[in-house]
Amino acid sequence: MIVEYIGQKIRSLVAEEREKAYERRGIGSSYLFRIDEHSVIDATRRGNFARFINHSCQPNCYAKVLTIEGEKRIVIYSRTVIQKGDEITYDYKFPLKMTKSTVSVGAKSCRGYLN
């Protein structure tokens, strides 16, 4: 285990409205991480370093939703041994129904998209 993705737990409809509000305010990046179809963690204003973990098509970590004492939480785990100075990454796996966001991380298996 590397870190828990921490922020404010909100409903999906609230997350959609916040995302639009963040865009209107010029906040280029929001840190919304979907737990399930009903809930999202919003780490845009409060959170820990987990919100700064970047995407990779060949990540060295993965995210997993765990239920702890009846509450769903997002935890980031390592796939490999991570050396000091290595960047921590995971696959964002954005929903396929979203507009494709291009990416070029230089990995051999890079899909070219976040979703």
Image (cartoon, grey):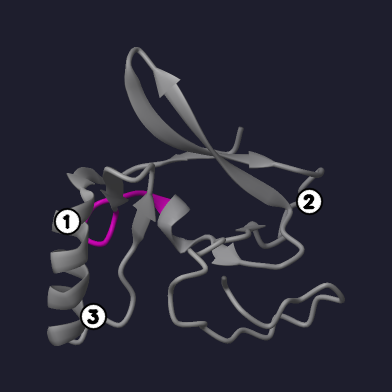
Q: Earlier in the sequence, mark 1 or mark 3?
A: 1
Circles 2 and 1, Cβ within 8 Å, touching? The answer is no
Foreground mark, 1 or 3, reads 1
Of 46 and 93, which appears nearest the observer? 93
Q: Disc 2 residue type?
A: Gln
Distance CA(mark 1)–CA(mark 3): 19 Å
User: In the image, residue 102 lies at what x, y percent?
Assistant: 57, 87
| 84 shown above or below 113 | above
Name the residue located 34 percent from the left edge and 62 percent from the top edge. Answer: 31
Q: Is residue 20 left or right of residue 83?
A: left
Instruction: Determine which quarter of the picture holds residue 22.
Output: bottom left
Residue 98: quadrant of the picture:
bottom left
For residue 4, what is the image quadrant? top left
- Majority secondary structure of magenta residues: loop
Residue that label 2 marks: 83
- Alpha carbon distance from label 2 to label 1: 39 Å
Say whether residue 41 is magenta: no
Relative image position of residue 44 (x, y in whole percent):
26, 62
**Disc number lying in front (3 or 2):** 3
User: What separation in Å lies between label 3 and label 2 (alpha carbons)?
Assistant: 32 Å
Magenta range is: 43-49
Residue 79 coordinates in the image, percent (x, y): 76, 43
Residue that carries the numbered disc 3 in the rendered image: 27
Amino acid type, callout 1: Leu
Q: Residues within 10 Å of mark 2 (few under 14, many from 20)?
A: few
Residue type beneath disc 3? Ile
- Where, quadrant-wise, is the C terminus in this rendering? bottom right
Q: Secondary structure at mark 2?
A: loop
Give the labeled residue for mark 1.
Answer: 13
Front: mark 2 or 1:
1
Q: Is residue 3 above or below residue 28?
A: above
